Amino acid sequence: MALNPKKHEMPSQAPEVRAHNFSEVALGYTAEIAVAEAQRCLNCKNRPCVAGCPVNIAIPDFIGKMKTGDFEGAYQIISQSSALPAVCGRVCPQESQCESKCTLGVKFEPVGIGRLERFAADWHNEHSTEAPRLPEQNGHKVAVVGAGPSGLTCAGDLARKGYKVSIFEALHTAGGVLVYGIPEFRLPKAIVAKEVEGLKALGVDVETNVVIGKTLTIDELFEDGYEAVFVGSGAGLPNFMNIPGESYKGVYSANEFLTRSNLMKAYRDDPVTPIMKGGKVAVVGGGNVAMDAARTALRLGAEHVYIVYRRSMEELPARKEEVEHAIEEGIDFRLLQNPVEVLGYNNPENPRDPKNGFVTGLRCIRMELGEPDAKGRRRPVPIPGSEFVLDVDTVIIAIGTSPNPLIKSTTKGLEVNSHGGIIVNEDGLTSREGVYAGGDAVTGAATVISAMGAGKVAAKGIDEYLMGKQQVNK
């Protein structure tokens, strides 16, 4: 049988339909398509795709199971390395990780590894009725701060080793960025809830509405009998441009905008929280969060949505698939442009005017690419005299986030870098004995799978630390 040079297409909603609903865009492979895509795998001896996976999933092995239609067997192989396979199959940037290493991709399109992972996980969630076996307990207690990708992964790995793990989550729902940041149309929240329930079945306790640093401190966790703590509190502190007018009503951080929509369901007809609906919207930034915010604004009823990005399409950091989906849905990309001021209605003679402070436009300047910066990307340079005004009434800033300083400010002996990230060694250990950290709390905003990889590293480090102490005590 001749080898298909292209990946099998992912069935999806039509752009003109999906732009007006929050249902998942990608519909997933059928069993027949999944088997056909798996057949494209060459089963290389050196397995370069595994090296490209931050959690080292045995990719050729699970695809081998899928070739024969053993979808449950494929899932079991994936789940040995990944605590969140249904999530990773949807949101991980496989094109720059496992699929970028695929040998088939040298001449043809690489195997659709992420799409196959998603299928295997969805098949398991739909068909499996067997409850996970509760591991034998080893008598040790570990606390995990944050129920995002790194925290859930660390908790799952430790629970499987017999640790009694408690997760402390600041929000009212577990999942971290998976529930507050990534929109329903990319990652249905029922899938995240299913993954969390799987961890609970392993004996993991999840306590929500607990803000470590306020409700409890890390010192108090140790006093309560926890022998190690993993900090996976993410990077929830939004960055702003510090340009005039950012305090006007109608200017959101992408964090606030997406949290109101995703976690607080502001898209419903009877929302419990206010949010922009309608009008003209400018989203500043070019990453995945910017794409999420722009596509969410469109679904909330915006009449026109702009992406304002200071570099060209070649430098755009968002996933290619997300950019393509945004273009198909009608998002207007304004490239090589950069905001310099948010304009607003302001009547100092009548501060009680109900329109006082509202956004009326976004002043921008055109850019050109100059010499490469420290990261190798060509530096954007303003073109003098090229300013213009974009007619918008909502501005969403999506230029990145930083770790929240709360845990650092309430925990003695915890060292951070100049960006507020917690400093760790190769095992995830911080400057404080027994305290480990990983994910965005260490690196700043990054990918879901890299946070999961950090959670796995820290779980291994915690296990070696506590087992080593146990041996010494004996």
Image (cartoon, rainbow, N blue to C red):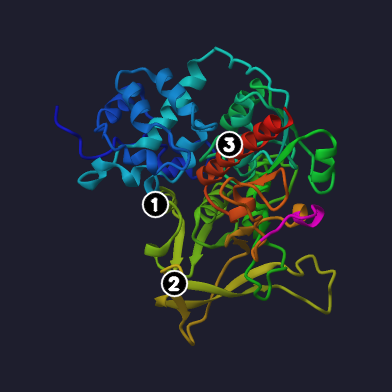
The range drawn in magenta is 408-416
Q: Which mark is residue 460?
A: 3
**144 part of magenta stretch:** no
Q: Label the magenta part by its dominant secondary structure.
A: loop
Disc 1: which residue: 320
Q: Quadrant of residue 434?
A: top right
Disc 2: which residue: 336
In primary-sequence order, the first of circles 2 and 1 is: 1
Task: Give the Cα distance between marks 1 and 3.
Answer: 34 Å
Residue occupying the far bottom of the picture: 385
Q: Could you tell me which secondary element the residue under label 3 belongs to?
A: helix
Q: Could you tell me which secondary element the residue under label 1 belongs to?
A: helix
Residue 330 lies, with reference to residue 178, above or below; the image says: below
In primary-sequence order, the first of circles 2 and 3 is: 2
Residue in view at x 70 percent, y 58 percent: 415
* Residue type marked 3: Lys
Residue 73: x and y in percent read 41, 19
Residue in view at x 62 percent, y 70 percent: 241
447 on left or right of 61: right
Q: Which mark is residue 173?
A: none
* Residue type marked 1: Lys
Q: Quadrant of residue 6?
A: top left
